[in-house]
Image (tube, helix red, strand yellow):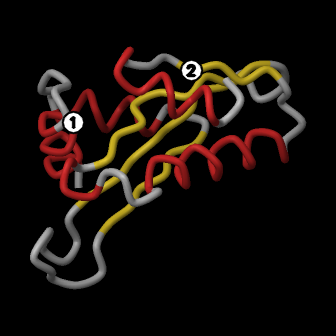
Amino acid sequence: DFERLNALFVSVGFSSRACDKLQKAVDNSYLALWVTTTRDSRFAKEGEVVGFARATSDGTFHATVWDVVVSPAWQRHGIGQGLMERIVDKILEEDICNVGLYSENKVVGLYERLGF
């Protein structure tokens, strides 16, 4: 649900994105990971998108990680780290060894802890 994904982006301070363009970006990505809630809780309703990450790649040499986001209510619970570990593992499984990313300065520490 790209409206929910866009709401997640806005909740962390990203600019709002047109849903059709967001869908095109995800469709053209090498890999996209979604984290959604499986039941209602005090933090989120069932099916709410609480985490997301995607990567683009040439499929051989290079991959770039984009748009790693976690809902503010779900931050500091390992979701961002889990997203990064899974996306990098999948890229490395394909023998793509040059992995880069773009990041906001405020979360550089997370990526440094993960070896970037």
Q: Residue at x 22, y 72 (%)?
A: 47
Q: Quadrant of residue 38?
A: bottom left
Q: Does the residue at mark 2 contact the one at mark 1 (Cβ under 8 Å)?
A: no
Residue 4 drawn at (x, y percent): 16, 52
Q: Nearer the viewer, residue 20 or 35?
A: 35
Q: Secondary structure at mark 1?
A: helix
Residue 79 drawn at (x, y percent): 44, 56
Horizontal placement of 93 versus 39: left or right? right
Tag count in the figure? 2
Q: Which mark is residue 9?
A: 1
Image height of 65 relative to 94, above or below: above
Q: Residue at x 26, y 27 (%)?
A: 21
Q: Residue at x 89, y 36 (%)?
A: 95
Q: Which mark is residue 76?
A: none
Image height of 13 relative to 2, above or below: above
Q: Quadrant of residue 15?
A: top left
Q: Nearer the viewer, residue 101 or 111?
A: 111
Q: Secondary structure at mark 2?
A: strand
- The quadrant the C terminus occupies is top right
Gap between marks 2 and 1 measured at Cα = 17 Å
Q: Amino acid at mark 2?
A: Leu
Q: Amino acid at mark 1?
A: Phe
Horizontal placement of 37 versus 41: left or right? right
